[in-house]
Amino acid sequence: MDTYNLGKIASTTGGRGALFHGFDIYGVHGIPIVSFSFETREQAEAAHKAMRDIVATAKLITAHP
């Protein structure tokens, strides 16, 4: 099993009903650790593509509140 997994791109709503497109990074227990949201699906797809290799090789991803 990989240490972290990259979720699929999905549409989500932000504050005041704004529509965003984003994805999550999940930890070993399947719980989202961090979420990324973008104004357009194209931006989300570009970021998702860039994150594939990062997430696949990361040994520790820590969310800071």
Image (cartoon, rainbow, N blue to C red):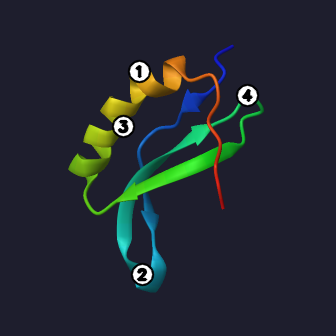
Label drawn at residue 28: 4
Which badge, 1 or 4, is on the more N-terminal residue? 4
At horizontal 63% and vertical 37% (from top left) the residue drawn is 26
Distance from disc 1 to disc 2, alpha carbons, whole Å, reads 32 Å
Pick whichever, 16 or 60, lies toward us. 60
Distance from disc 2 to disc 4, alpha carbons, whole Å, reads 32 Å
Distance from disc 1 to disc 4, alpha carbons, whole Å, reads 17 Å
Which badge, 1 or 2, is on the more N-terminal residue? 2
Where is mark 2, residue-wise?
Answer: 17
Amino acid tagged 4: Val
Kind of element beneath mark 2: helix
Distance from disc 3 to disc 1, alpha carbons, whole Å, reads 10 Å
At horizontal 21% and vertical 48% (from top left) the residue drawn is 42
Where is mark 1, residue-wise?
Answer: 53
Which badge, 3 or 2, is on the more N-terminal residue? 2
Label drawn at residue 48: 3
Amino acid tagged 2: Gly
Of labels 1 and 2, the one closer to you: 1
Which badge, 2 or 4, is on the more N-terminal residue? 2
- Quarter of the picture containing the N terminus is top right
Pick whichever, 16 or 47, lies toward us. 47
Of labels 3 and 2, the one closer to you: 3
For residue 3, side relative to residue 29 (left or right): left
Of labels 1 and 4, the one closer to you: 1
Q: Quadrant of residue 9?
A: top left
At horizontal 32% and vertical 31% (from top left) the residue drawn is 49
Q: Is residue 24 above or below residue 65?
A: above
- Quarter of the picture containing the C terminus is bottom right
For residue 46, side relative to residue 25 (left or right): left
Q: Is residue 23 above or below residue 39?
A: above
Distance from disc 3 to disc 2, alpha carbons, whole Å, reads 23 Å
Amino acid tagged 3: His
